[in-house]
Image (cartoon, rainbow, N blue to C red):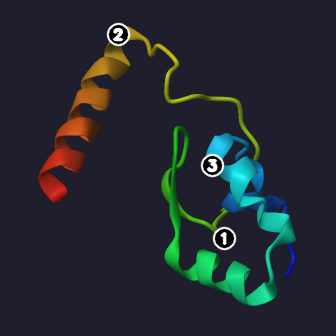
Amino acid sequence: MNNEIQNNFKAICLFNGAVFKNLDYTTLKTEEKIYIESNVCIFSALYGLVPANGGISPYRLDLNNVLEPHFKELNSEMEKNLSTDS
């Protein structure tokens, strides 16, 4: 299974938070990787919701970053949409 997709990388391979470190994707069996790639989505601060095997480029943006005032409205709108979709 190739971790690089057309100059992008599988989303699951780029994140390094506690969950991803404990998952240790690179050590999983092929069938476990296939399951994750088919069933897991990751919320990215830049790309939004992406499949685990979705191709993304490396970036440095954290969900805890303070956004400029004109982005606060967008942030509030996203939170509202996420809470009403469930």
Please give the count of numbered marks on the rendered protein. 3
Q: Using the image as rendered, state which of residue 25 and residue 63 is in the foreground.
A: 25
Q: CA distance from mark 3 to mark 1?
A: 16 Å
CB under 8 Å between callouts 3 and 2?
no
The residue to which callout 3 is attached is: 19
Please tell me how crowded label 2 is: few (under 14), some (14-19), or many (20+) other residues with Cα within 10 Å: few
Place of residue 44 in the rendered image (x, y in percent of width and height, measured from the top left): 54, 45
CB under 8 Å between callouts 2 and 1?
no
Q: Residue at x 72, y 37 (%)?
A: 59
Which numbered disc flags the more N-terminal residue, 3 or 2?
3
Q: Using the image as rendered, state which of residue 56 and residue 15 is in the foreground.
A: 15
The residue to which callout 1 is attached is: 53
The residue to which callout 2 is attached is: 69
Asked if residue 67 shows in the view, the reply is: yes
Q: Which quarter of the figure is the N terminus placed in?
A: bottom right
Q: CA distance from mark 3 to mark 2?
A: 31 Å
**In terms of secondary structure, where does tag 1 sit?**
loop
Three-letter amino acid code at the position of disc 1: Asn
Three-letter amino acid code at the position of disc 3: Val
| Between marks 3 and 1 in the image, the one whose residue lies nearer the viewer | 3
Q: Residue at x 30, y 30 (%)?
A: 74
Q: Residue at x 70, y 30 (%)?
A: 60
Which numbered disc flags the more N-terminal residue, 3 or 1?
3
Which numbered disc flags the more N-terminal residue, 2 or 1?
1
Query: 65 above or below 46?
Result: above
Q: Which quarter of the figure is the C terminus placed in?
A: bottom left
Three-letter amino acid code at the position of disc 2: Pro
Q: Residue furthest front?
A: 22
Asked if residue 3 shows in the view, the reply is: no
